[in-house]
Amino acid sequence: MNEDTKKEIERLIGDYKYGFKTETESLRDTGKGLTKEVVEEISAIKEEPGWMREFRLKAYETFLEKPLPAFGPDLTGIDFESLTYYRKPSERSERSWDDVPEEIKNTFEKLGIPEAERKFLAGVGAQFESEVVYHSTLEELEKQGVVFLDTDTALKKHPEIFKEYFAKAIPARDNKFAALNSAVWSGGSFIYVPKGVKVDKPLQSYFRINAEQMGQFERTLIVVEEGASLHYVEGCTAPVYTTESLHAANVEIFVKKGGYCRYTTIQNWASNVNNLVTKRAIVEEDAHMEWVDGNIGSHINMKYPSCILKGDNAKGTTISIAFAGENMHQDTGAKMIHLGKNTTSTVISKSMSAKGGKVNYRGLVHHAPSATGAKTNVECDTLILDGESSSDTVPVNIVKNNAAMVQHEASVSKVNEQQLFYLMSRGLTEEEATEMIIMGFIEPFARELPMEYAVELNQLIKLEMEGSIG
Amino acid sequence: MAGLRIENLHAEAEGHRILRGVDLCIDAGKTHAIMGPNGTGKSTLASVIMGHPRYKVTEGKITLDGEDVLAMTTDERARAGLFLAMQSPAEVPGVTNSDFIKAAMDARREGEKNIPLFRFIKQLDDAVAALKMREDLPHRYLNDGFSGGEKKRNEILQMRMLHPKIAILDEIDSGLDVDALKIVGDNVTAMKDGKLGLLLITHYQRLLDYISADKVSVMMQGRIVKTGDESLMKRIDTEGYDWIKEELGIEDERVVPDDDERVFLEKCATKEALE
């Protein structure tokens, strides 16, 4: 680094340190690294109420105190000093389409993603003009009293609901990355479904997609009131390209008595992104929470969607797939915490690894002393596609009462030679046959997806598999 | 003449020599039955013809209408017109029968358009009815949770849909009750169109009550030791194989190591079942 550059950096840092409060308008981002000042700055830019500012600052302290997780993939490579924690949405669009890697462009092409969406997904366009397209859907929801906003706007417009639920499922002290998110969160979705309202069509984040939403530290808060129901589809199957290397989101869901919520995600972050996400639902009496969770992208991915089955007869379901290709480590699973009587949970996990990827299932089932009559079924299957790839299953089952039942089934297999021979003996090439076996393997997951997502998922897996056979 | 020619075929698996010089012709339009006690290499022969990766051919030749079969991969053999109805067909969960069969049909229409969907559905429905299978077969997963008899009928259903030149039926009669055997027999017989070459591998004469054979061969010690017509089969049915062993001076007819012996929990098709 030469002297001029150093001076330039000092000038910029100096600017940032002392000038940000008065020069908010011209501020592009909060610079690299995280300090108390950066947290205050984020809160100031967003013109937040004092309680949120205090919450963020406290979370920041917690983030500093908390160690990295003591399990799973090695995260010591994350350089927190080199990250930028807040960037104005308008600044994110400064990247040019030419800078987007060919690989990502090709995938868009092969998936047939519309032009406008491509630019958005690649982080080139700041605003995807989706609100126009989905205007009538949104209007209909509004009439039913459903609130569907980005989380920042929701804090301004619905402070009472917000304060009642925010960070009640995932306290900042939960883990290091939940604390980080709590300190610097920005964007995400806020959904409130009033008592008895059944949202019949899946609600998609596409409807309200904007740069804020696709941020690194998004925060989602969903409240499904008594007897209401919701299916929310977050993100998309298309690869999301970003130059930032960390995505740490928090998703909190509250399902009230007799309510139903399904949360579908397929994450397909670019291979430079570490995806460390905390997802948790609190499920009341007779309510049902379903996580449908697909993990196809990112470098290191740690995600264990949880259900706290608080009320009697509450139900929790997690259906997930994870695919680890070259240079990928998927450490995913599910957590089911049974507190209420006769609570039931089901976990179906399908994992695949190829081209040296590593895919782990890590799960927790906990039946508390109060959870008499609780039942859990866990089924995790793994398919290892070549000799370089690997997989581990790490289930933890804790049962603290005598009237509960846990079933755990696990299988690990290679692509079965007999199946392959059978399909090939009917004229399918080795590649077609392998693909068919894999599609069959993930079918229990794919059939839970809305049609267009299932089609895209199949396409993606095929693309990921290219060149890994023979 | 058109058909499958096998000359002096030798093959081994995991160091065991199993096929030791098989000579066999299956002419187009003809049916050839191979009988023999357990462990003499009959099923190995079927697998080797189809190119199962477990077996290594060490000597000999296989041609189909003059084309070198051994130079082809398994899928190429299938597209060239070979079909093997397997003894224990694999189960493939998550893949529906109709998706699989359509993919197999499209695979052999190289350079042509895929089969139109409505025509395919019609053909499949007809085949399901002809084999008296459950109507929801197209939507069920491939052999997943099928009974032994259902699996066998599903093999014949695929054969009907794929129109092979040469079909090898490997113990298609095992695990079938009398009614199912009749359905399978009638369907296979209906497919004989003067061009289809059939190789039937069986332990029992009973199958030949439903599908008539032009030639019957006996396999022992990994090769064909005797060939005749249906009267040979009838004699085996009443007297067993000992007379052949005596005639040929064979003491141990087996070539497949004991630990490779297949165990069937299904009911075998026995002559007693008929009575």
Image (cartoon, rainbow, N blue to C red):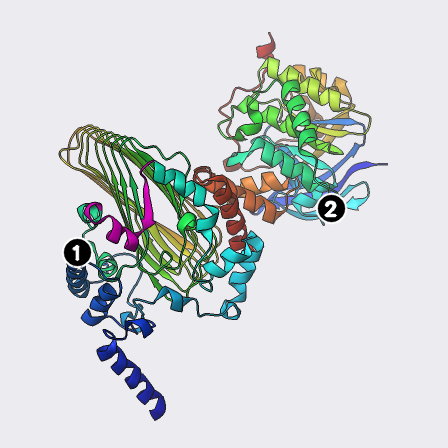
Check if residue A275 falls in the magenta segment. no
| Drawn side of residue B92 relative to residue A88, left or right | right
Q: Secondary structure at mark 1?
A: helix
- In the rendered structure, find residue A282 and report the number of the disc placed on it: none
Indicate the amino acid at tag 1: Arg
- A147 inside magenta stretch: yes
User: Measuring 64% from the left and 23% from the top, which residue is drawn there?
Assistant: B125
Q: Chain of mark 1?
A: A
Q: Residues within 10 Å of mark 2 (few under 14, many from 20)?
A: some
Instruction: From this view, report whether residue A422 is shown above or below residue A243.
Output: above
User: Which portion, as a residue range, is magenta?
Assistant: A144-161
According to the image, label 2 marks what residue? Answer: B60
Which residue is drawn at the image coordinates 44% and 45% (left, top)?
Answer: A135
Looking at the figure, which quarter contains the C terminus of chain A? bottom right
Depth check, front residue: A158 or B147: A158
Q: Chain of mark 2?
A: B
- Return the x and y of residue B106 as percentages of the image width and height: 68, 39
Amino acid type of disc 2? Gly
Give the residue drawn at x 60%, y 13%: B178
Residue B224 in view of the camera: yes
Q: Residue A24 falls in which quadrant of the image?
A: bottom left
